[in-house]
Image: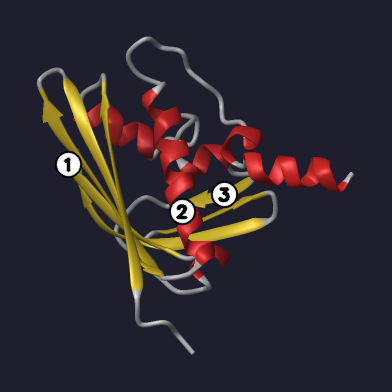
Amino acid sequence: MKSTQTLTFQFERTLSASPIEVYDAWLNPKIPGNPWNAADKFILDPRVDGLFFWSLKGTAHYGRFTEFERPGRMQHTWVSPNTLGQESIVTLTFKKQGQDTLMTLVHSHLPDHDLAKGHEKGWNYFIGVLGEQFGDGSRKKYRWDEAHPAEINNTESNS
């Protein structure tokens, strides 16, 4: 039976770049901090009704882009094992703040379940890495163990 209660997570980061730079970086699989960069396999068709698929460590994520308003907003659906196969919605906005951009990511319509709550940690990690691509230019690379420290600790304790 499908749960009627849903979760919504909202994340904000101020990035030292213009809205168009941040918007474009979110869609560029070569830039760490977006989901496509971390993928072992991915398909990305960034246009309205375009599909995406990405897999990381055997876990598949997929959805359909529903909105593009470059450089201010994009939206897509999101389905993964952690959404219990239910479609959720990811909305990103990019607002100019002086020389910077306020990036807001809202992930809504998630099932009220422990697996879905993991999106909070995942999105915080990804957009934190994305933020490091601007400003001081540290260009941090995606690291599985930083994104999933509990899994590494569980694996080590099971050895």
**Location of mark 2 (residue):** 119
Kindly tell me whether residue 70 is visible in this rendering. yes
User: In the rendered image, which quarter is residue 38 located in?
Assistant: top right
**Location of mark 3 (residue):** 42
**Location of mark 1 (residue):** 72
Please tell me which residue is depicted at 79% across the width and 45% down the height of the picture. Answer: 155
Q: Are marks 2 and 3 in contact (CB under 8 Å)?
A: no
Please tell me which residue is depicted at 37% across the width and 9% down the height of the picture. Answer: 136
**Mark 2 vs 1, N-terminal side:** 1
| Residue 3 marker | none
Question: Callout 3, which amino acid?
Answer: Phe
**Mark 2 vs 3, N-terminal side:** 3
* Rendered view: 85 above or below 104: below
Residue 133 x/y as whole percent: 40, 21
| 28 with respect to 24 (left or right) | right
| 114 with respect to 57 (left or right) | left
Q: Residues within 10 Å of mark 2 (few under 14, many from 20)?
A: some
Please tell me which residue is depicted at 28% across the width and 55% down the height of the picture. Answer: 75
Please tell me which residue is depicted at 26% across the width and 50% down the height of the picture. Answer: 74
User: In the image as oriented, which residue stretches furthest toward the bottom?
Assistant: 1
Question: Callout 1, which amino acid?
Answer: Gly
Question: Callout 2, which amino acid?
Answer: His
State the residue in front, 107 or 71.
Answer: 107
* Rendered view: 122 above or below 128: below
Q: Secondary structure at mark 2?
A: helix
